[in-house]
Image (cartoon, coloured by chain):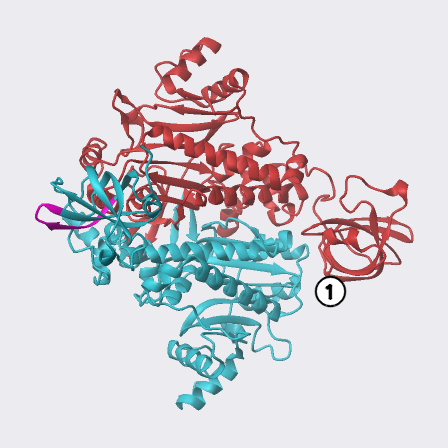
Chain colours: A red, B cyan
């Protein structure tokens, strides 16, 4: 008999079905056993007598009949809550070992290290699954939004031959007889490709040898990068980013209602237009609101980001806010200084719910000015040869932005730690397993 | 005035337009100048008098009027061939340096090293652009085909903590105080995720420290990976792969007619069903056709792959062919031995137009059998802890496959070298720039 997916069972009342899935929970009431079966489409209650013993998480095949539940046993919280399966035959396809903790709870309530030590098991919990369903929707929405605007996808390389911006937080790779590094950003590639395709985007892993353990940094993240040419001003970049972010939210709203409700999450609140402040304006506001005088600082500290987001929500009704005009010399060489005051640049961060979601802005496109910056920033031309080559042969005014997929996921769902928003998170203490444990084992 | 895209100019005969793009070619006829302008949507001829001198590839803005061409000057090979732009004003936005070679030819005809040394420039040629437009369509078609079958996308990590299958062709990464490596395949991740999502796919970079320079190997490639559970047999995997490949071809046919014609390329010929041979059957056929006795070999050599593809096309009318039942002990530990003869496994390669496009097959899902294989293959359990964990808690019968995006692109378009199918190809001699040159410069 063909397999029936659980989501299709309510349509088959009175019919025989063959189901396959995981035992989500088992409740043994003497002779009668209630068993919740889970597959990729949902959960359904199955009932049987004299069943073989079966442990939670085992993979089973159930042959049975779909019956309507008595009115008072209907479960309104379950999509299949009006029916149940009368088990005629249960076969264990792949038995599960005894679980180290109860997987049948509404919330897992595990410490983060345990959650990650048992990643292959804990991901089976519906709330963990939900995170990565939402993430898949976010990422595809990013691509889809940009394809609708004529952007073309490219595959950004991970291995690079030089680190144009200094190498403190870069991973080194043994590359035959040469040194190579892991890319911290596809920035130079996406910019040079504007000289070819006008509009490009990429979704790829980037790497930071972040030597500290925080709740918002990982050593490997998924970067959503976009870059485009023939802009009239840096404000075109903001406009495109706002379009993309709104598109992502609307897709998540459309496709992830169930997942959002599991987290009691609501999508970020947005007014007609996301507010925009210059760094200096933001610093002035923070000073006025808190008395902390940050007006001579060259960047926003984490508490400043939180404060300006609070302001944005209270005063503008917006969970997101753009901050522009960061200090030119604190930014990479390709940044475009504001001609009215070159101390500050047409660089733009998007903050959301207290933290940075993305950075972007207009980039230099004039070859001579780029060369001047390369010199001023103390870089070597040969380290960025392919980049310079593009601009040597004509590139239009351009700009772009990069969103971190994990950060967007984290702040849409209200997760506390970015590790929860990465399916296999890497930090200085963990690559799947805890590295210290690994070292101990190795040295013993 | 709003910018008009070149593809929209034929609709605006008689109207004033503002165009932006690159100077594709310039032909100076004394006082009158013909200039082909290129943007992301096409090419259009512009005509003007007393124009400022402008070099090919410069970025320009042209204000002018769309006029119909006289009947005998219509160019049927150009989508805008019935019109031209009367230039009223030409402004150089970003001038191009003198080109090292003529970019205006139908074919670039450059040696591969030169093509790659000037990657930022040569990618502007329409045939080079076409390769990566086709590749973008292939990759999105892969995703789309699988989403239609309920597969969920995940982001496979690149940094791994151990090399379960030995480390000859793996890149080592300095990871704080630990050793880490670049992933050669998301195989173990996608398999363990079948225990969670049933059906998963990923598109990500994989890495091979391939110590030789061939026309079909790169050190970094884009892998299109799919894996799914609750299969009834290994033939379900073949069926799913055939569906995906046909879907890719139909999308390329629909969306890339122009690009295919630039390469005089035709999509691979397929009968109702892609032929399937066991390794031994293929070897027998090769022996009969060529007299070369490869019947005791444990794998197909490149010339065997070419010969069996020839057979497939001649005898079955198929440019693609599945080969199954490779030698178990030559495959990774997770391979599923055929119970009827465990010397051979349910592993399947897809060959196309003379070379391997993908490998896949059914994988072990029984925990005890996996542990036996781990021991037999001489691996350490702790190196694949997360993988084993998944199977310890119940995973259904599963299988999957991986397609190389560059190989599919290369063989659809009939490219001679895989480097042409990678936008920024990496091999042991090149990461963007030639590494030997880089070393020379560094040591001087």
Q: Read off the magenta span.
A: B22-32
Q: Is residue A374 above or below residue A157?
A: above
- Chain ID of residue with mark 1: A
- Image side of residue B154 versus residue B93, left or right: right
Residue B31 in view here: yes
Q: Position of residue B93 (x, y in %)?
A: 22, 37
Residue at horizontal 85 percent and vertical 42 percent from the top? A74
Q: Which residue is mark 1?
A: A2
Q: Residue at x 38, y 76 (%)?
A: B302
Instruction: Report the front residue among B411 and B8.
Output: B8
| B23 left or right, relative to B365 | left
Q: Residues within 10 Å of mark 1 (few under 14, many from 20)?
A: few
The percent coordinates of residue B304 (x first, y second) are: 41, 80
Q: In front: B1, or A74?
A: B1
Judge from the rendering whether residue A72 lies leftward or rightward of residue A61; answer left or right.
right
In this view of the protein, can residue B166 be seen by the observer? no
Quadrant in which the N terminus of chain B appears = top left
The percent position of residue A100, horizontal first and vertical second, equals 69, 46
Q: Nearer the viewer, residue B288 or B44?
A: B44
Name above or below for residue A369 compared with residue B211: above
């Amino acid at each position: 008999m063909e397999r029936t997916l659980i989501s299709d069972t309510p349509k088959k009342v009175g019919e025989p079905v063959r189901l396959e899935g995981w035992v989500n929970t088992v409740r043994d009431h003497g002779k009668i056993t209630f068993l919740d079966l889970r597959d990729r489409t949902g959960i359904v209650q199955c009932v049987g007598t004299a069943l073989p013993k079966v442990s939670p998480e085992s993979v089973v095949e159930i042959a049975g009949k779909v019956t309507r539940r008595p009115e008072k046993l209907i479960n309104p919280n379950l999509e299949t809550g009006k029916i149940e399966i009368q088990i005629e035959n249960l076969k264990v396809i792949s038995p599960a070992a005894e679980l180290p903790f109860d997987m049948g709870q509404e919330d897992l309530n595990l410490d983060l290290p345990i959650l990650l030590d048992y990643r292959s098991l804990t991901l089976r919990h519906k709330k963990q699954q939900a995170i990565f369903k939402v993430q898949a929707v976010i990422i595809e929405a990013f691509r889809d939004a940009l394809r609708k605007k004529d952007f073309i996808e490219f595959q950004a390389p991970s291995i690079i031959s030089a680190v144009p911006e200094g190498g403190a937080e870069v991973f080194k790779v043994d590359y035959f007889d040469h040194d190579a590094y892991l890319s911290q950003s596809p920035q130079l590639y996406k910019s040079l490709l504007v000289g070819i395709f006008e509009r490009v985007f990429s979704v790829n892993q980037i790497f930071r040898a972040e030597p500290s353990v925080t709740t918002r940094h990982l050593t490997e993240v998924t970067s959503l990068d976009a870059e485009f040419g023939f802009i009239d001003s840096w404000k075109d970049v903001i406009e495109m980013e706002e379009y993309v972010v709104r598109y992502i939210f609307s897709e998540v709203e459309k496709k992830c209602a169930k997942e959002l409700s599991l987290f009691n999450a609501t999508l970020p609140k947005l007014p007609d237009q996301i507010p925009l402040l210059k760094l200096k304006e933001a610093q002035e506001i923070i000073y006025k609101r808190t008395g902390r005088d940050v007006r001579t600082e060259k960047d926003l500290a984490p508490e400043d980001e939180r404060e300006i987001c609070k302001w944005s929500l209270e005063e503008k009704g917006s969970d997101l806010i753009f901050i522009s005009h960061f200090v030119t010399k604190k930014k990479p060489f390709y940044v475009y200084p504001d001609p009215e005051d070159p101390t500050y640049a047409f660089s733009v961060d998007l903050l959301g719910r207290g933290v940075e979601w993305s950075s972007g802005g207009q980039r230099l496109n004039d070859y001579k000015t780029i060369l001047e910056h390369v010199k001023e920033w103390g870089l070597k031309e040969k380290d960025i040869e392919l980049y310079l080559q593009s601009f040597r042969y004509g590139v239009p005014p351009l700009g772009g932005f990069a969103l971190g997929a994990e950060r967007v996921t984290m702040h849409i769902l209200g997760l506390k730690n970015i590790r929860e928003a990465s399916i296999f998170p890497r930090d200085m203490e963990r690559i799947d397993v805890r590295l210290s444990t690994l070292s101990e084992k190795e040295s013993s």
